Image (spheres, rainbow, N blue to C red):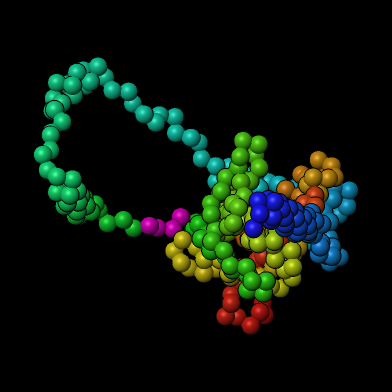
Amino acid sequence: MSKRNIVIAILGLGILWILVFAVANMVISNVEDADVSILASPTQRPLRTDVPELRADTATPTEDPDEVALAEDATAEATEEFTEEPTAELTQEPTSEATEESTEEAEPTPRYTLSALQFQQFQTERQEEFNEEYLASLPPVEIERDEDGGAYPIQIAIQDIDIFSPVLVVQTDPEFNIVTPREEVGYYALTPKIGAGGNSVMVGHVYPGRVFNALLDVEVGAQIRVTDEFYEEHYYEVTEIIRFPYEVGTEEDRELGFEYMYDQSEERITLVTCYPEYEWTHRFVVRAKPIDPDSDGDE
């Protein structure tokens, strides 16, 4: 084969490789664009016509307006009860005399002549001996319920919509927004604990794959099971579902919605997430009252 033919063959292979690379790159780009378009234009579930919107210029859809003043007083009392003052004195600076004594009594660091394997074995044996002595010296610990019978929730399950999740205790951020866990349900620590006789508020994210994504499909009458830190199960039944403006609407609308969320007029749990799907302009609020799972439902 002449040199000319070899050069032509090499050039042909190079051009073929460039064409294959260009076609593959085009296919990959089209697939990525298709994925992005799917994410950017998701199919939104139809808005629920059975969920009323709570606004300041309309009457509360599920409660008597005359009870608003009582609910405000109960919410204020509950907030004060479950808020503790921070401890003023946390640390104590050592005195100069104590510092001098500790300096005088300090012993030099011992030098070990063991091999690395012998030293590791020696350290393991010392740690095991220390653990046995330390655990034996500890007094027995008994966790007791609060005086009001409340306990932290650790799990929540709504079988009708396939929700089963651990529950984390959460607080608010510097802007007073409840810190919502990414994957779990969050119990807002400034509301009464489960079984304490008040309104326990829990929050969660709503998005495909998130914990409260199916909460938007819950119906009145659905049962909720909450397990507390003592592994006791509490059962609830959904009684009310409302939405209120959060990113839109007036400040009065948001205040009325928060009053509804944190109302402490009776024992219940309140589940909160965003609404509607992919817009998140409102808050979706589900109320559930305690029930006896063994009863026939007749009161």
* Magenta stretch bounds: 143-147
Task: Tell me the residue at 82%/54% (across/down).
Answer: 54
State the quadrant of the C terminus: bottom right
Residue 224's place in the image compared with 181, above or below, is below
Q: Position of residue 113 (x, y in %)?
A: 10, 39
Task: Tell me the residue at 86%/54% (across/down).
Answer: 59
Q: Position of residue 40 (x, y in %)?
A: 79, 54
Is residue 285 visible in this depiction of the protein?
no
Is 5 positioned to the left or the right of 111 in the image?
A: right
Q: Position of residue 61 (x, y in %)?
A: 83, 59
Q: Position of residue 253 (x, y in %)?
A: 82, 46
> In this view, which residue lies farthest toward the left?
113
Task: Tell me the residue at 59%/51% (across/down).
Answer: 181
277 or 76: nearer the viewer: 277
Is residue 181 visible in this depiction of the protein?
yes
Quadrant location of residue 297?
bottom right
